[in-house]
Image (spheres, helix red, strand yellow):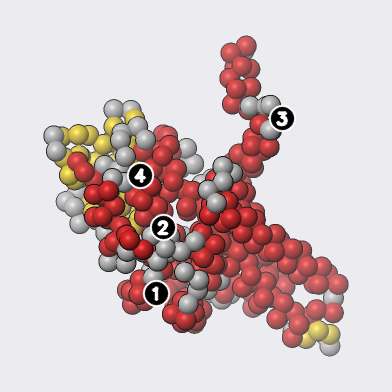
Amino acid sequence: MPPTASVATLVARARAEAADWDRAGELPDSVVAEAARAGLLGVGVPAPHGGSGGTPAELGEVCAHLGGACSALRALVTVQDMVTAAVLRWGTPAQRARWLPPLARGERRAAFAATERGAGTELSAVTASVTEHGEEIEISGHKRWVTFGRTADTFLVLGTADGRPAAVLVEGDRPGVRREPVEGQLGLRAAAVAHVALDRVRVPRDHLLAPVGLGLSHVVATALDHGRFTVAWGCVGMAEAVLDAAAEHAARRTQAGAVLAEHEVVRALLGRCAVDTAAARELCARAAHARAERLPEAVADTVVAKYAAARAAVRVTGGAVQTLGAAGCAPDSLVGRFFRDAKVMELIEGSAHVAELHIADRLLRRHGFNSAAHVARREARA
């Protein structure tokens, strides 16, 4: 589904009210309901499962539109898409029939609960336990930095069962689920972030998504891939909105009798930001094409797009703050909010260094170099 009139109305509202949502620390229920009515919580879900059946490019454009207005609103679409994508790809027919329609229609709100205190970038280190008890599964653990963890009623939880990764769907109203609101974080302040404790939470066995052992490599990998894709497009929208604001300010602002844009250093800065933004959009479009055509390089192209788009958002928002000066530094201004949000987007899944290594490994494999094998041989010799 391409952006519709209802999406445009929601985006206009977000531009007007996002600063208030940021200060309040959450999206109003009416906004979430409006997003659901517009079909935004099931863009990537096929129509037979209650979604809009949009293409990757259409999902990307939706996230770009939302990202240019409110990062938390885009994050709402991201987490919903992460969970629905995992269920769609790895769920049984019965699980798809049960979970997808209410998630796609926004009747249930999703959250992705994977990160722990000792397991951030390296999710294979999670310690949350998943134990089988006849026809039930018991989950215990403490998840951190769960986007929309305060308001979600459906969690996709990553844990470990007998040393093997397991992914389980957990309703938020189950006994033993406790939420600790996170407030005052750097960015995404309206995304209702929470730490979520699971204390011997029992769910039916059919809440296990995919066989034990595939929880990380298959289920969570699918969710993270979709998260990267939507975050990348959201960063493009963020960069485009901030670049436009900076250019408008430079064209109109008069300082010491001269228009700001008359200074070569300002025009050069805007030029660099324009190139970064355009390049990020092209890489996101390439990733969307690869996903639509189910090309082998789709996942790798998405990694590249997310890396480039997040860096573009950081550079453009930084350049805009420099161009706008005090006006751009106001924490609740569009540029100020996106300056904070962009840094969070860059840090998702770890530092940029981690992404650079993945991208370099892909390049080097074309020339016969396997970094993991190389390190293993070196350690064996040592």
**Residue, x 37% and y 35% (percent of image)?**
214
Q: Where is residue 52 in the image (x, y as percent from the top left)?
A: 40, 66
Of residue 173 and residue 185, the one placed in the foreground of this image is: 173
Question: What is the secondary structure assignment of the residue under circle 2?
Answer: helix
Question: What is the secondary structure assignment of the residue under circle 1?
Answer: loop
Q: Distance between the residues labelled 3 and 4?
A: 34 Å
Of residue 109 and residue 336, the one placed in the foreground of this image is: 109
Could you tell which of marks 1 and 3 lies nearer the N-terminus?
1
**Residue, x 53% and y 71% (percent of image)?**
65
Q: Distance between the residues labelled 2 and 1?
A: 15 Å
Could you tell which of marks 4 and 2 lies nearer the N-terminus?
2
Q: In this view, does 97 lie above or below 143?
A: below
Could you tell which of marks 3 and 4 lies nearer the N-terminus?
4
Q: How far apart are marks 4 and 2 (CA)?
A: 14 Å
Disc 1: CA contacts within 10 A as few (<14), some (14-19) or many (>=20): many
Q: Which amino acid does label 1 sit on?
A: Ala
Q: Name the residue under label 1.
A: 38
Q: In this view, does 44 lie above or below 92?
A: below
Could you tell which of marks 4 and 1 lies nearer the N-terminus?
1
Q: Which mark is residue 367?
A: 3
Instruction: Residue lying at the far left in this picture: please name it.
Output: 134
Q: Which amino acid does label 3 sit on?
A: His
Q: Mark 2 points at which residue?
A: 81
Q: Residue 90 carries which label?
A: 4
Q: What residue type is labelled 4?
A: Trp
Observer-side mark, 4 or 2, equals: 4
Q: How far apart are marks 4 and 1 (CA)?
A: 26 Å
Q: What residue type is labelled 2?
A: Asp
Q: Distance between the residues labelled 1 and 3?
A: 47 Å
